[in-house]
Amino acid sequence: MHPSALLDLCTELLKSVLKLDMPADALVSAFFRKHRALGARERHTLAETTYQVLRRRSLLQHLAQSGSGALERRLAILAWQGNDAALRGALGPHELQWRSQVQSVDPASFSDKLRHNLPDWLAGPLRTELGEAEFWALISALEQPAPLDLRVNTMKGRREDLQRMLNEAGIEAAPTPYSPWGLRVHGKPALNKLEAYLHGAIEVQDEGSQLLALLTDAKRGEMVVDFCAGAGGKTLALGASMRSTGRLYAFDVSGHRLEALKPRLRRSGLSNVHPAQIAHERDDRVKRLAGKIDRVLVDAPCSGLGTLRRNPDLKWRQSPQAVTELQAKQRAILASAARLVKPGGRLVYATCSLLRAENEDVAAEFGAAHPDFVPLPAAELLAQAHVDRAETLVNAQGQLRLWPHRHATDGFFAAAWQRR
């Protein structure tokens, strides 16, 4: 495709995405379905340029003010993630001169707001939580794309064998730093045609998400509930941990998300998983299991701000009001899920948020209101599950707390309790 045409397509895509009325990944996927003739390199350029604009929107919009023409075109020019020589061939002399002038601006002259590219309501709490140096380390991490992590299905193979198979297929893979199940892959290879993927020996799953399943530590023959199962990544990890024995319920209010679990479930070889759509956290299906469950994982609905490397649009689409509403939902779901746990059983509350309001604050309120649930030290639980350097993964309260800049995972939180 001629560079001018590709730049025009990028401008069109950005006009849609920057409305911020739908998730960016869904809009990008829909755009590619509409333009099926695009090659892999062209799709990569369009997607990565779009995500770069979202990551650095405040700064790029500030810089784009000095140019002329459609704003989205100016943003695409400044954020371009494709062949630079090709882009220069698509620009007129005035655009080339303008781009050169913008690129010569000293980054040290920018205000903090332009450098961190976060809304004030989000930057403030994170700066307070982390301190100045770590805050900027987090910002640097959030400006980079997330790595591609895989979970090895231990029902179907060993990590070292799958690593060798991937390397032989020309895919550079290395063990993840913490999870004994994980492999980190270089780049973004097409996995869906690999035999290991088609037969369920590997699944795409961030290392942080794998650690939530390891913290839950579901055992053979147990009754286990994944309370907010979604598309089932953690469900599959729990089922493999149980060696396809016992009974594993995958609850979610979204039938669409549970449908997405079915092909993955078939590939996994698991026979102990029972997906079930529930109307709400007080559904009769939930009430019938009260006091009977050995392990309950509550990966609660949250702001998703721990996934900003993958979903940079979230920082512009979320709001303080939305977080407050989510807190109320998180409290209600956690309280209802807790009723399922039998005496001696384990409850895990988790989010993929960076905010204390959705994490430590919700866990503290639950603990204060439920003295029959005793906090468990996450480092000890993870070490028992063969997680390396587990002591580096916890906060001052002994809860799991993962940060992109510290651990190279998505941002995750998890607290664990045992019922008396």
Image (tube, helix red, strand yellow):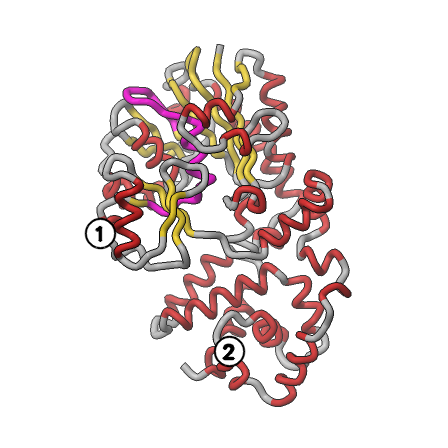
Q: Residue at x 42, y 14 (%)?
A: 342
Residue closer to the observer: 5 or 152: 152
Above or below: residue 310 compared with residue 175: below
Residue closer to the observer: 155 or 62: 155
Q: Which residue is mark 2?
A: 7
* Residue 133 sits inside the magenta stretch: no
Pointer 2 or 1: first along the chain: 2
Q: Which residue is mark 1?
A: 195
| Image location of residue 53, percent across then percent down | 58, 65
Corner quadrant of residue 227: top left
| Amino acid type of the residue tagged 2 in the rendering | Leu
Q: Please tell me whether mark 2 sits on a helix, a strand or a loop.
A: helix
The part of the chain drawn in magenta is: 203-225
Above or below: residue 83 compared with residue 228: below
Corner quadrant of residue 332: top right
Q: Can you see residue 337? A: no
> Of tags 2 and 1, which is closer to the observer?
1
* Residue 213 sits inside the magenta stretch: yes
Q: How many marks?
A: 2
Question: Viewed as shown, does residue 155 lie left or right of 260?
Answer: left
Q: Please tell me whether mark 1 sits on a helix, a strand or a loop.
A: helix
Q: Residue at x 31, y 55 (%)?
A: 191
Question: Viewed as shown, does residue 304 lie left or right of 345?
Answer: right
| Amino acid type of the residue tagged 1 in the rendering | Glu
